[in-house]
Amino acid sequence: MINALKGMKDLLDKDAYYYEKVIKTCEEVAKNYGFSFINIPHLELCTLFKRSVGESSDIVGKEMYEFIDKGQNHVCMRPEGTAGVVRAYIEKKMDKNNAIKRWFYHGSMFRYERPQKGRLREFHQFGVESFGNASVYEDASIILMLVEIFSRLNIKFKLLINSLGCLECMPKYRTNLVRFLDSKEGFCEDCLRRKSLNPIRVLDCKNEHCQNLLTNAPLLSENLCSSCQKDFEILQKILKENNVNFEIDPKLVRGLDYYSKTAFEFISDEIGAKAAIAGGGRYDKLIEYLDGKSGFGVGFAMGIERIIAILEQKEEKLQREGIYLCSMDEKYITKLLKLATQLRKKHKVILSYEAKKLAKHLELADKNQNLIFLCMGENEAKNESLFYKNLNTKKEEQILIKNLENVL
């Protein structure tokens, strides 16, 4: 028997139901915020991620699915979505006039890391990216969009925010941080590598010993320029006015090198330990990193598998839907197939191709979580009617086929 590769998982039955529910909810909210769909390739040149995500990130350092294709191109499966969306923005020359674009995307991402609960080698994300708007109000709207999504999905969360500064205040902070790091010994190999490439990433280390060494590290909040400080205060005010609880985490830096100014993360303890379920921020530097004209960008990405894990724990009762159409005699199935074709223009219809007793058909319709049960027996065939039952309300009646649409 051939099994799925390690870290790859089929989405079917209840998982597929929750996946569709999450994506549908996210799309509805994103569209209400003025965002439209973009689809980007799963395969990109490795250079795209090495230049955008950054050499100091674990994604580039350890986790990319990369290989040489038949054309001798160094390619990889996309490990995240933002870089590809930015590449599309630049490739279509939208950066030339700093065009305002608001896009959402969803689909598979790939990282070669140790599979664990809520984390796979092929996983799925929903994300949004907004270009051409420098205002912190756009940052706030992006966060409020996520708040609305989690509200609709009935998911509890804690919101962490921070400011990563800009090109004016970051150099001063970097100098202070490197001086502090040089005064300490015992950092892990990852931290030592990050210190030379992007020192701020050291703050993101999950190693407990490293975190102890960082106890008195200088904080970004102490080094913000007046513009960044003002924007950060406005962001907090907006969140408070919209009744969104949050905590300022001075060591929140996000996992990727391209962030600046606003950074945020949503965490949840509904799947055990506190786990990040979504995060993002502003990345004004990224467009220029990828050879575009200097501009503005902000967005987020949400881990779908972790959201599904939370929803499954709540044991939500699946909603009944669709019509189960059946016959008690095989000779009526051709007639019902024609009827099913007509009904499928407006309704979800499951047609049974086998003749069974009424009780057996009802059992199957109930197992399939269908809402409407329609069956044809000898009497119904003579009268051009169907036996109707609503499996929620248990209402039963005989309905003439010509009046069926009025009842449905």
Image (spheres, helix red, strand yellow):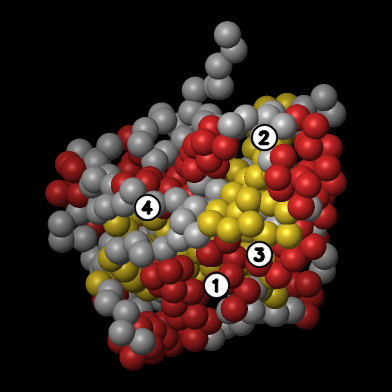
User: In terms of image quadrants, where is residue 251?
Assistant: bottom left
Q: Residues within 10 Å of mark 2 (few under 14, many from 20)?
A: some
Q: Earlier in the sequence, mark 4 or mark 3?
A: 4
Q: CA distance from mark 2 to mark 3?
A: 22 Å
Between label 1 and label 4, give the one nearer the viewer: 4
Q: Is residue 298 above or below residue 56?
A: below
What quarter of the picture does the N terminus occupy? top right
User: In terms of image quadrants, where is residue 214?
Assistant: bottom left
Q: Earlier in the sequence, mark 1 or mark 4?
A: 1
**Along the line of sight, which residue is nearer the eye, 27 or 398?**
398
Report which residue position mark 3 lands on: 408
Between label 2 and label 4, give the one nearer the viewer: 2
Report which residue position mark 4 lands on: 316
Report which residue position mark 2 lands on: 328
Residue 72: give x, y in percent of width and height.
Answer: 80, 28
Q: Earlier in the sequence, mark 2 or mark 4?
A: 4
Q: Please, what secondary structure does the residue beneath circle 3 have?
A: loop
Between label 4 and label 3, give the one nearer the viewer: 3
